[in-house]
Amino acid sequence: RPFKRLADYLPPAFSIESTDLTFELDPVNTVVTAELQIRRLDSKVVELCLQGQQLELLSVQYKGHLLSADDYQLDDKSLRLTVQDDRFSLVIKTRLQPQANTALEGLYYANNTFCTQCEAEGFQRITYYLDRPDVLSLFSSSLIADPQQYPFLLSNGNKVEQRELTDGRRLVRWQDPFPKPCYLFALVAGDFDTLSSEYQTASGRTVQLEFYVEKGQGSKASFALESLKRAMRWDEERFGLEYDLERYMVVAVDFFNMGAMENKGLNVFNSKYVLVSEASATDKDFFNVESIIGHEYFHNWTGNRVTCRDWFQLSLKEGLTVFRDQEFSRDMGSATVNRIDAVQVIRTAQFAEDASPMAHPIRPEQVMEMNNFYTVTVYDKGAEVIRMLHTLLGEAGFQAGMRLYFQRHDGQAVTCDDFVQAMQDANQQDLTAFRRWYQQSGTPVLSVKRSYDADRRQLTLTLQQKTPPTADQAQKQPLVLPIRYQLLGSKRSSSELFVMTSAQASLTFDNVEATALPVVLEDFSAPVRLQHDYSDAELLRIATEASNGFARWDALQSCWLGWLQQAVAKGESYELPEGLFDFYQQLLHQPLTDLALTAELLKVPDYAVFAENFSPIPVDAILDAITDFRRQLSQRLAGAWLHCYQQQRQTTPDYHETNVGQRALKNRCLEFLALLPECNKTVLEQQYRNANTMTDQLAALKAAQQGGYPGFHTLMEDFGKAWQHDVLVLDKWFGLHASNPDPAVFAQIEALCQHDKFSWQNPNRVRAVFHAFTMLNPGQFHRLDGRGYALLTDTVIQLDGINPQVAARLVTPLLSWKRFDTERQSLLRAALERLADRAGISDDVFEKVSKALA
Ligand code: HT7
Ligand code: ZN
């Protein structure tokens, strides 16, 4: 099957100056009329090739003349015409069946609502078009539908007309004043609860803010609405960027392939990232809502006003926008915990992707199915690359670069190189070597060695970087690494920056004591794997003394990894050092001011964090060691967990930094208390029954599950009944069932798939069950009888016929088969072969599976 390659990019030979769309909406028979004003840009090209998929072509008019089938070529991917004029109009009529569109790309109909998803290449499922991001057009759209069933007819831009037609249908017309690529087009038609407000921009304009959510859910959108206002203000204050339309609409739908979509003036959101209340959503859910609302809003400049030239440049908008949303979240809550969370994503998911058959640079060079490249590499490593630019240039230099970028490219479709060039020119810095981050895949390993010369009182750090080969690239070169460091126990106690540009470098510190201790890679200033030879005592010293909160946490992570490696090597219980118990005892009696950070410091890392550091991955030994570490901590510090738990017990329910930190710490204590048979019952039951937030209730359930509390099933039954009416909460319940570490989980998953609220058509439901099973239940998923792999393979096959995009995301845990022992390797390989050999398997799944087997 063919790949598309970055090297083959050619500018478009035609532009579409305006696009006028009329939708006669009906779930089984929607007619779309597209009137395009087209201009030839390259006089040598006579063939106009428009992309189109899953369309029924009804008619084509060229300059007002109806064409016959002999006048064009049509196949299942395109409509081609030979054209002589330099300017001409085309009117194309197509018929769609939105209800049958379970792939949720293009125009689909679910839950009595019409909705579109056009990124990356979904617009070609609406009409024949130049479906590429560098074709910018002025869009207008008329939506026609029965006003009883679909009272709200929404599209991008300004509403310019509304009238009732003689046949009783309603027509609403929209015009978007900003030229845009078709991936930013959107329409929504349905019946909703609305929540509106106004926002006054810095320059004094008034913007209407409108949220459209499922009937009866209006009150759950107010946090999202307030988050939007905070994001708008923040972007004005930090980046000097103001919103540009009169109206900003957000629609929440339950059927959605991803988190949200930044369509111009009309964002569409997965309802999970809009609808929250203290009773039904956790603090993590609130956090996600604010961050994703921010992310989509920030795209209005970084993505919409300046967009991508081609899809290989996706990180231009996504890496930059993730960086912006991370900075926003950091300013809204605990800066350190935000950084820890972002780093965890890189160290687990992104490093794993680098080590997998799907390894690619943040600017990929070839793709079969673009939807497969909305990855942690493009998004999160992309954001780390932007963060390194920020570290190298400083806030003022970075903002100067941003201003130049918008000055040069507003209204254009550009490349990652254009972005770096603007940063370079605004700062008169040569970023040539830095650009390598865009073309090189893989995780650099940075090793640090120390030597101390007692006579000279001189400490030398020798740094070496090396990037191991990846599945897509054998040869690697040194990268530019900004390394933030601090020297503990010396006069130079503030944080400094060293920029490493070659494979080896050294740093010397004069006039320092033998006890001076360098803290390297503060705030994870470069996305690398760090190797060092620090002792437990030194790491615990960093965890206690470093001024950088992230560095404290990170030192402890290194300790955990070392202890786990020893436990795995020994094959039996490894006794945790006294220093750790002392450190924890101290934290539990005197938590840091940042309670959320305290909770992070008190955590035994998850399976995924440990697994990422092994090849082959010793699944069972890691799980055994984690269980043993938790047991040791719970028993040795039983009194301290209880003391701290009681100190933090009362929390006010609202989502506010202090309350969030308090809950995080309290629930960390609960996790360990639940492992003690003597306090299980009262503490768990009380917290479950008296919880005033979903955070606390769910934490009690999870702790009960992990602690093997016998009353767990009764609590789950109670929870399932109590939340029957709320699918977003039921998703949590589905996930908890699927993460049950007992073999009974297979029967439970079978039952969940029969649940009347479960639907194979709904990605949220499917992900709730199967994401939890594959990612949060490693013991059962990686069973040595292959039952876990077989379940996932059957699921992928079933889902591929319904929604290939979601199926391809779900298949990921099967790909890294080479990272396991030989028994698991052969089971995983057989599962992959079963998928590859299946007739009619989608390009989405095939691309990933075939790479894994190559
Ligand atoms: N830019 C949006 C990407 C997206 C998407 C991509 C493929 C298929 C479905 C999708 N839904 C949303 C989301 C974002 O990064 O903001
Ligand atoms: Zn995005």
Image (spheres, rainbow, N blue to C red):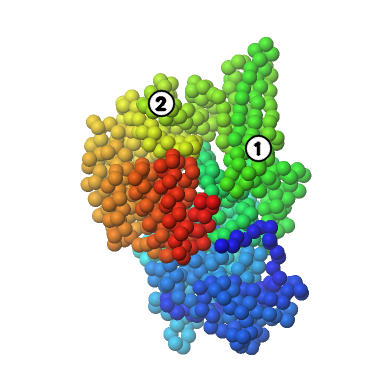
The image position of residue 611, as x and y in percent, is 46, 38
The image position of residue 601, as x and y in percent, is 45, 32
> Picture quarter containing residue 77?
bottom right
Number of residues whose C-alpha sits closer than 10 Å to that of mark 1, classed few (under 14), some (14–19) or many (20 or more) = many
Q: Is mark 2 on a helix, strand or loop?
A: helix
Which numbered tag is attached to residue 481? Answer: 1
- Residue 160 visible, this angle: no
Number of residues whose C-alpha sits closer than 10 Å to that of mark 2, classed few (under 14), some (14–19) or many (20 or more) = few
Residue at the image point whose x is 66% and y is 48% from the top: 439
Residue 487 lies, with reference to residue 221, above or below; the image says above
Residue 309 lies, with reference to residue 716, above or below; the image says below
**Total numbered labels:** 2
The image position of residue 509, as x and y in percent, is 67, 21
Kindly check if marks 1 and 2 are in contact, taking CB atoms under 8 A apart as contact. Answer: no
Q: Which amino acid does label 1 sit on?
A: Leu
Between residues 825 and 535, which one lies in front from this camera angle? 825
Measure how far apart labels 1 and 2 are at the Cα level.
36 Å
Q: What element carries label 1?
A: strand
| Quadrant that contains the N terminus | bottom right
Single out the mark in the foreground, 1 or 2: 2
- Cβ of mark 2 under 8 Å from ligand 1: the answer is no
Drawn side of residue 105 relative to residue 68, left or right? left
Between residues 201 and 781, which one lies in front from this camera angle? 781
Residue 854 lies, with reference to residue 560, above or below; the image says below
Residue at the image point whose x is 43% and y is 28% from the top: 569
- Cβ of mark 1 under 8 Å from ligand 2: the answer is no
Q: Mark 2 points at which residue?
A: 570
Residue at the image point whose x is 54% and y is 43% from the top: 355
Q: Reading the chain from its start, which is encountered first: label 1 or label 2?
A: 1
Residue at the image point whose x is 25% and y is 35% from the top: 680
Which numbered tag is attached to residue 452? Answer: none
- Residue 429 visible, this angle: yes
